Image (spheres, rainbow, N blue to C red):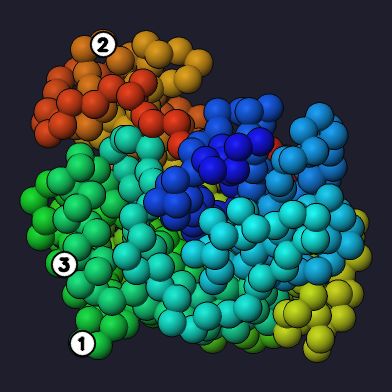
Amino acid sequence: MNMAKPKVIIETYGCQMNVADSELIQGILHEAGMEAATSLQEADVILLNTCAIREKAEARILGRLTNMLPYKRRKPSLKIGVVGCMAKHLGDEIIRRAPYVNFVVGPDNYRRLPEIIQETTTESQVLTNFIRDEFYDGITPRRPRGLCAWITIQRGCNYVCSYCIVPFVRGAERNIPAHEIIHEAKTLAEQGFSVITLLGQTVNSYRYEDWDFCKLLKAIAAIDAIEQIRFTSPHPLGFSDELIELIATEKKLAKFVHLPLQSASDAVLERMRRGYSFAQFKEIVQKLRALQADIAVSTDIIVGFSGESEEDYELTKKALIDLRFEFAFLFAYSERSLSIAARKFPDDVLPEVKQRRLAEIIQIQQNISKEAFNRWVGRAVPVLIEGFSTRDKNMAIGNTREFKTTIFPRENYNVGDWVEVQIEAATSLTLTGRATKRLKAAKFALEAEEAIDLGISLGPSPNDDEPEED
């Protein structure tokens, strides 16, 4: 293998933060002269950028590592690295379970990857220490060409929810300087990215000097070439009236909010250390819908948390029925080592009870989502074209301002066009119809086929054997 310019492929697991981190890593490796491999067979280095949100996710990634063994046997010089949240969570344990892994690197140590790749030989390296002042400033992520781009505005988390290990694997909250975020947004706009998604573990808690989240949103909305701004994931505690009003009045803000509830039982919320009551959460949803009737609100729910009684669960089930979220990410509680809950609360809800509760709310949410999407049938709605179907290049895929995925015949429309689509049918996840006219032409000519292959792929789902989402 010629290690002067090794070819690297990255498999990405987990949330949008991990996808953004993979683009960041690719930028670091590109600056170091490393190239993107187009396949596992071609790769000199395989990186698994990992998730640690649940035990099953880690187990599946460990299983994925066993799939790397044949490549290692065929090419002994191949280097395999595990990076990201699972790397920080398990550390040396990964090497013990998979001794053929060459290095394990945590979320604050990506700058070291080029030298680790070059220097690692027979002895495995583990580098997972926190670096409080690591913002990855000065690094340009390598993004595929397209319409949409992520901007990480916050790393780590200060909300130490008892079930969660994010603060233990990503560290305390660190907010990126506002001027750097705005500079990155302007640069992206100049490159043709017109949809920006701001990322943070609790994105609306953003504070930097005299900047808060609303001030940052307004500054980015003032950039002419940016058409739409999205953000994820906010925390209910930081959802101010000012933010609610801004979502309703600022045309560039997507009319969509993902607002994690987790449970509708105040007793469970208290054990989870969420910091709000169900009544406070419900008030936020009501205020959002009062100011923006068509706003889409989605949520996260965990069933089977420590001590969750049948009465607690029934409160959550009733909240799904009453609040009628557009869609929801639904999970059975998975105890995580390092978390406060693992140390303080027994995992005392039987697995079969968890799975029964999960199956019930999945069915409830599927019906609600189908109803919510069906309400759009017969309407003509603006849709931003974000790409074309990989199965059928003649079909365009876009999103409404309410972040509803919409599929329709491509005809002569381009990525970046705003078009009016007459909605003809719906499922619990998508709208389908036909475009009737172009509302606004794309500012940059871009075909979906032009996307640059950066060697970053979404790995096989760590959770594809169990129902979680509606």
Assign the C terminus to one quadrant of the image. Answer: top right
Residue, disc 1: 210
Question: Rounded to the nearest whole Å, what is the CA distance between mark 2 and mark 3?
Answer: 35 Å
Taking the image as drawn, is residue 97 in sight?
A: yes
Q: Position of residue 186 (x, y in %)?
A: 17, 55
Q: Earlier in the sequence, mark 2 or mark 3?
A: 3
- Categorize mark 1 by other alpha carbons within 10 Å: few (<14), some (14-19), many (20+): few
Please give left or right for residue 294 compared with residue 215 in the image. Answer: right
Depth order, front residue of 79/289: 79
Amino acid type of the residue tagged 2 in the rendering: Glu
Residue, disc 3: 218
Q: Secondary structure at mark 2?
A: loop
Question: Rounded to the nearest whole Å, what is the CA distance between mark 1 and mark 3?
Answer: 14 Å
Depth order, front residue of 219/359: 219
Q: Residue at x 63, y 28 (%)?
A: 42
Name the mark nearer the viewer: 1 or 2: 1
Q: Secondary structure at mark 1?
A: loop
Number of numbered discs on residues: 3
- Categorize mark 2 by other alpha carbons within 10 Å: few (<14), some (14-19), many (20+): few
Residue, disc 2: 411
Q: Position of residue 103 (x, y in %)?
A: 71, 59
Q: Earlier in the sequence, mark 1 or mark 3?
A: 1
Q: Residue at x 15, y 67 (%)?
A: 219
